[in-house]
């Protein structure tokens, strides 16, 4: 029983090292502001990392494809629901991140550090 906290800390450390290693091999995404809008461009031959969310919103991601898809789906759903409750011009990335994506991200991180009690 005394080694349980050590195992938990070791698991967190291993997860952190795993994520760091995966991020090192990632390829960048560039964003350029132009007169007609913003250009997002992913570099690499793998899966696309740039996704359209709505008419004027897009996102780029790096990570595990299943995690990216879940995050993308939440963002797409939120971007399509928001115009029904507000003016379409009021739907911004800041609003989507603050009220839809951020709470889910916090919950995912919190779940990592919570100890499971059976």
Image: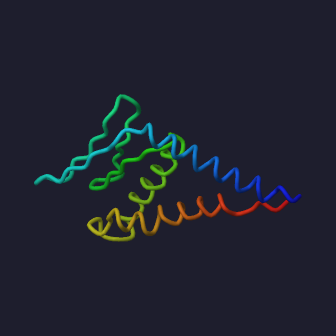
Residue occupying the point 47% across, 64% down: 100
For the C terminus, the quadrant is bottom right
Q: How many marks?
A: 0
Judged left or right of residue 40, residue 109 is right
Looking at the image, the residue that sits furthest to the right is 1
Depicted 50 relative to depicted 12: above or below: above
Depicted 82 relative to depicted 74: above or below: below
Depicted 86 relative to depicted 74: above or below: below
Q: Nearer the viewer, residue 5 or 113?
A: 5
Residue occupying the point 58% across, 50% down: 16
Looking at the image, the residue that sits furthest to the top is 45
Judged left or right of residue 36, residue 4 is right
For the N terminus, the quadrant is bottom right
Q: According to the image, what is the colour scheme of the structure?
A: rainbow
Query: Picture coordinates of residue 12 (x, y %)?
Result: 66, 53
Q: Nearer the viewer, residue 88 or 69?
A: 69
Judged left or right of residue 15, residue 115 is right
- Give the image quarter of residue 25: top left
Q: Nearer the viewer, residue 12 or 32?
A: 12
Q: Nearer the viewer, residue 22 or 56?
A: 22
Residue occupying the point 27% across, 42% down: 41
Residue occupying the point 34% across, 32% down: 44
Looking at the image, the residue that sits furthest to the left is 35
Query: Picture coordinates of residue 116 (x, y %)?
Result: 77, 60
């Amino acid at each position: 029983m005394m080694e349980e906290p050590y195992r938990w800390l070791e698991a967190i450390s291993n997860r952190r090292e795993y994520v760091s290693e995966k991020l090192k091999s990632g390829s960048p995404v560039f964003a350029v502001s132009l007169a007609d809008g913003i250009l997002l461009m992913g570099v690499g031959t793998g899966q696309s990392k740039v996704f359209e969310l709505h008419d004027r919103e897009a996102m780029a991601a790096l990570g595990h494809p299943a995690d990216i898809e879940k995050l993308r789906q939440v963002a797409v759903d939120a971007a399509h629901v928001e115009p029904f409750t507000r003016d379409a011009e009021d739907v911004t990335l800041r609003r989507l991140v603050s009220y839809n994506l951020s709470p889910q991200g916090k919950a995912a991180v919190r779940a990592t550090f919570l100890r499971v009690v059976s």
